[in-house]
Amino acid sequence: RRVDTRPLGAPSMWQRLLLTATLLFAPLPVNSIKELPGVKNYEVVYPKRLHPRHKREVKDPGQQENFETELKYEMTVNGKIAVLYLKKNKNLLAPGYTETYYNSSGKAVTTSPQIMDNCYYQGHIVNEKVSDASISTCRGLRGYFSQGDQKYFIKPLSLTNQDEQEHALFKHNPEEQKTNSSCGMNDTIWAPGIHLKLCGFLQTSKDQKAWEKKKYVEYYLVLDHGEFKRHNQDQEEIRKTVFEMVNYINMLYKKLNTYVALIGMEIWNDKDKIDISSKASLTLENFAKWRTAVLLKRKHHDVAQLLTTVAFSGTTVGLAYLSTMCSPDFSAGVIMDHSDNALQVAGTMAHEMGHNFGMFHDNYNCKCPSIECVMDGSLSKNIPTAFSSCSRASFEKFFEDKLSNCLFNVPLPTDIISTPICGNHLVEMGEDCDCGTPEECTNICCDAKTCKVKENVQCAFGECCEKCQLKKAGEVCRPAKDECDLPEMCDGKSTLCPSDRYQINGFPCQDGKGYCRMGTCPTLEQQCTDLWGPGAQVADKSCFRHNEVGSTHGYCRKVNNTHIPCKAEDVMCGKLFCHGGSDYLPWKGRIATFLTCKLFAPEDSREEIGMVISGTKCGDKKVCINAECVDMERTYKSANCSSKCKGHTVCDHELQCQCKEGWAPPDCSSSSTVFNFSIVVGVLFPVAVIFVVVAIVMRCQSSREKQKLVQRPLSTTETGLHNQKKPQMVKTVQPQEVNQSLYFVPSRVQRLGHYDCPSSFLLPTNPSFPPPLISISVSSSFLDSNPKI
């Protein structure tokens, strides 16, 4: 017999094998395998792709990989098997997507890369009630997904295309402390010319359903020179990181029925094109000016953001103008690249975009369906996954403004440069419609399999399509919002409503107090309210004479920090003088008051807050243009246009003739009103004739029956009248008591919905404003030492 000579307690061979297997396959902490920047601990998982059409092969790194529309991966999450369902984000890039970089001579070079396929997906954990995901499948799984209240991040530990390769899975602890990072946005910061918004009671919007329609944000991202160096000067690496960020932003805004698509990316690979300061407000101002002067002329877009490696002062990591989405001057934001986790930075990008949509910071009254919502005032290591009740209400309110019209522009098929794909929600060349895949299509007019309209159907989408049929030429598809707007009519051929048009520049508005300019009616009264709040009024004209002095308290222009006095005829176009309103403003500067004249002098001499804006009326048929009171015709040159637009046409802001309401484009010779009236007459006239004939017959029959009742029997000797008293119909009018409460209704404010206003925005019975941060003058900056997002 064999004698076991091993020392007592020594493990057997099977025990050693079992121990080895346990060490090999057990989830291991990061310290024992590979360190990941910013990650303390993670477990190793092996995602397995389910039901592949073919077994995945290990491909050469340079070989192009095809990515399917839908994918499923199985992995162990928190000790249990989880199946991750993913669907490709086909709207990641907007039609006409371009990339811009600079050559050795500093000249901008713009290309239109043919990105035929992408590896960016959105989805959820199967059979999980609360779950979402934003994942890139480029050489492994990289991104974020949630399972209940827990958020997970996943990234490959090796860059291969092999199935079931090892990945790092790590989660964020909801109990982690907030970081000291925040947004530099104060809830009372507005772009110049934007109304000072306070929470209050709102009137019902005439277009209250506009926010429910599908919206498209054409998003442009600029990366500074520091970002170029941070990504090892590798344009492909930059592209993958940016696409991952935009995929996540799109996932968030889809919950608001809004699709954020990247229409352009610019890399400052040679040098920065603006002065990027540690002061976020100055950087934002510089970027907004560069966008207006350079970027918008090169590429159309709805909103632009600058991503920079420059550290902003204090705790600020981002800043944006409020309620300025679609604005040609202020639809912008700046973001500091504050984390190695791209999705945390993307959360800040989504947050600043929320400010452009008019969203305030969340407070204790806001209901957040997640651990952290997008508009939280301070950042934590948890990325936001939802919008609060307050954000949704502000978002809804934003669409009462005509600026939001840019978000309803459906891309034309001729604008799309990529290969047509049926099922991507974009109508491309050769397609009549595109309502998504057959499983998700709800359009009864469109065949989802072919992207063609069904039989006996004229159209399947658009403002000029109703019940699968084209609307008649001349029918209004976009009514005028105010006196400086023009209605747009269908032409009877296209399903889309024409682009938004405005009244001709110089058209009288506000009962003669102003003249229309680019769809707005700038008046001194409104500018005083914008600056000083409710109750402010225009000062006496004598106050404006101080603009002839040429000092900080009165001037027309500044040249090299020198105040240039106004000429006598231009005094109404310089510094704005008002009286009344609040003395507490969100800008840093000084308030000067003498007699009934009040003005604001910003501390930053480059800012133009408190100046009369261009387009303001300064006399009969005169307007302010660049601080000069000029003849309106000299500026707008609209007289000739008005003379050429005859008949049923009217001249618009671009000096083009547009049809008047009710007249069908393009020649405006036929009236939809006359056409509809003829239809009504043609239908109602025969009905009216029949009704008259029936009424006569019934009246004759009724008369005969009455005669029979009046006749007496032949044996009756008395003759007399049988008088019947017709009952009198008394119409009773019940008095109604109407209680009408009057409320101040500010323009473009946060809608309450079913929650209370933030305490700092409540309007008490006797309106009062919060105390100044520093003494009497407005010397407090909107970027304080501990700013909020």
Image (tube, rainbow, N blue to C red):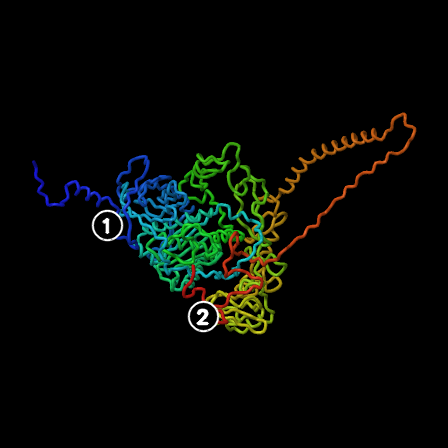
Give the residue number, with chain letter if any, for mark 1: 33
- Image quadrant containing the C terminus: bottom left
Q: Horizontal placement of 673 versus 368: left or right? A: right
When the figure is inspected, residue 207 is found, relative to residue 320, above or below; the finding is: above
Structural distance between the alpha carbons of marks 1 and 2: 61 Å
Q: Position of residue 624 (x, y in %)?
A: 56, 63
Mark 1 closeness class: few <14, some 14–19, many ≥20 residues within 10 Å: few
Which one is nearer the viewer's eye here, 478 or 659? 478
**Quick one: 678 or 423, which is closer to the camera?**
423
Residue 3: quadrant of the picture: top left
**Residue found at the far right of this picture:** 717
Residue located 62% across and 53% down the image: 643
Q: Position of residue 584 (x, y in %)?
A: 51, 67
Tell me if mark 2 has few (under 14), some (14-19) or many (20+) residues whose alpha carbon lies within 10 angstroms of its own: few
Residue 116 vs residue 534, the one in the foreground: 534
Q: Nearer the viewer, residue 671 or 426?
A: 426
The residue furthest top is 714
Quadrant in the rendering for residue 102: bottom left
Marks 1 and 2, the one that precedes in the sequence: 1
Q: Is residue 477 left or right of residue 345?
A: right
The residue at which mark 2 appears reads as 560
Question: Where residue 766 appears, x then y in whole percent?
Answer: 58, 64
What kind of residue is marked 1?
Ile
| Residue 710 in the image: above or below residue 570 | above
Q: Quadrant of the N terminus?
A: top left
Q: Secondary structure at mark 1?
A: loop
Residue drawn at 68 percent across, 36 percent down? 684
Q: Is residue 574 visible?
A: no
Front position among marks 1 and 2 = 1
